[in-house]
Amino acid sequence: MKKLQDLASFVAAEFQKSYGRPPRWIAAAPGRVNVIGEHTDYNDGFVLPMAIEFYSVMAADRPVDGREVITLRSTLEPEVATIDLSRPVVPGVPKWGNYPRGVVAGFLARGIQPGGLEVLLHSTVPLGSGLSSSAALEVCTATLLEAVTGSTLDPVEKALLCQKAEHDFAGVPCGIMDQFISALGREGHLLLLDCRTRKTEIVPLQDPSVALLIINTNVKHELSGGEYAERRAQCEEAARNLGVKSLRDVNVEQLEKGKSKMRDLVYRRARHVIGEISRTVSAVGSVRQSDWPAVGRLMYASHVALRDDYEVSCPELDAVVKIAESIGEQGGVYGCRMTGGGFGGCCVALVKASSVDGITKKIASDYKVRTGITATIFSSRPAAGATVLRG
Ligand code: GLA
């Protein structure tokens, strides 16, 4: 929390520099790391993410001149984004402005008028790293607009509004996980989300003997590249071939029986998803029992399926997992896997808290030797979801 308060002070000072007065509202929303349950959300499956202590933060005030325009400045981008509320809100430039634009459009579609605003944005969520910087920005915008308008949305509706912003304004047909965890994260807890019923269950992760390490390969991932949409379509094809609504409705035996009804590629995609849904459910049981070696094995199995069946890993992510495996449980690593959409971005590792420093050094140096790239490695406790810090 201290970190967040410091961040709020920084953003308030930046707002003052840009607009010449203190902000009236400040809102924040976290990024996330997914512990397990990858590429299952758009298959009606389970996911087990946690919010991380990295945030998108917005400070705002009404414009002095009363204009019906939302002006957004960012500490990270040189261009100013504007949203003219007297016209239909559509995607535009700069590109980063499309996330807030999409959220504003969602509020307007519900008949909630945000009114003119001057906004200063700052984010500590690494961009394009599979830690949901875009969902954090969307949920932060929605949380700010709730504070500004006094209209609090149901959290599920809020997450869906933000997901629609990503679909319609950023062109990424994402699932529901990222916006959900950014809106609903709970300090000290993982969030088990049933993406079919949208019911959530909090799972405590408070054992001081373990930590989650996030290893950023610093290879950028870009989900609008088409592979994500292609995977989604292949899953839908598998479900159609099996005569079910989604892959959630199928177990391994049913998949094996139906194998001849589908292309081999589609079969492998489905095998990952079906396996991953059951791994996620098992992982929750193991986390609840503090059976860390079991959680670690499930994480490794998840990575293998993502690499070989789902084909969304990349050599750098595989290198991190190999290094983690070579350190092994004796060295303090229980498990490791790629996290998020894939094709770059981050790995998540479950490790012994007492070994964090040694593991960090070893992964950093071996990764540099294998790839020539410098990784960024940090740990985070499970953080709280979106919050209004002022206003
Ligand atoms: C991205 C999407 C999520 C989810 C993951 C893969 O982060 O935004 O909805 O599908 O990829 O698990």
Image (spheres, rainbow, N blue to C red):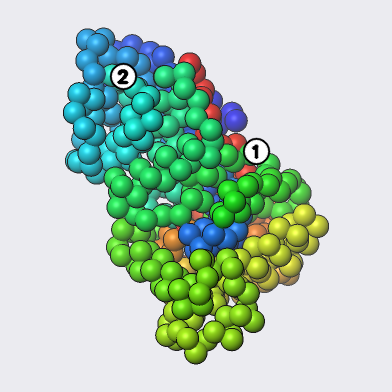
> Could you tell me which residue is drawn at 64 percent across and 46 percent down?
200
State left or right for residue 131 relative to residue 278.
left
* Helix, strand or loop for disc 2: loop
Residue 84 visible (yes or no): yes
Q: Which of 343 and 75 lies nearest the eye of the viewer?
A: 343
Q: Which of 210 and 362 lies nearest the eye of the viewer?
A: 210
State left or right for residue 74 relative to residue 25.
left
Residue 231 visible (yes or no): no
User: Which mark is on residue 187?
Assistant: 1
CA neighbours of label 1 inside 10 A, class few (<14), some (14 to 19), many (20+): many
Residue furthest out toward the right: 289
Residue furthest out toward the bottom: 260
* Helix, strand or loop for disc 1: loop
Res. 98 image quadrant: top left
Q: Which of 307 and 323 lies nearest the eye of the viewer?
A: 307
Q: Position of residue 374 (x, y in %)?
A: 42, 60
Q: Position of residue 231 (x, y in %)?
A: 40, 69
Q: Which residue is mark 2?
A: 115
Q: Position of residue 76 (x, y in %)?
A: 31, 38
Quarter of the image containing the N terminus? top right
User: Which amino acid type is shown beneath numbered disc 1?
Assistant: Glu
> Could you tell me which residue is drawn at 75 percent across and 60 percent down?
285
Q: Is residue 171 above or below residue 66?
A: below
> Could you tell me which residue is drawn at 52 percent across and 86 percent down?
259
Q: Earlier in the sequence, mark 1 or mark 2?
A: 2
Q: Position of residue 358 (x, y in %)?
A: 63, 59
For marks 1 and 2, give the CA distance: 32 Å
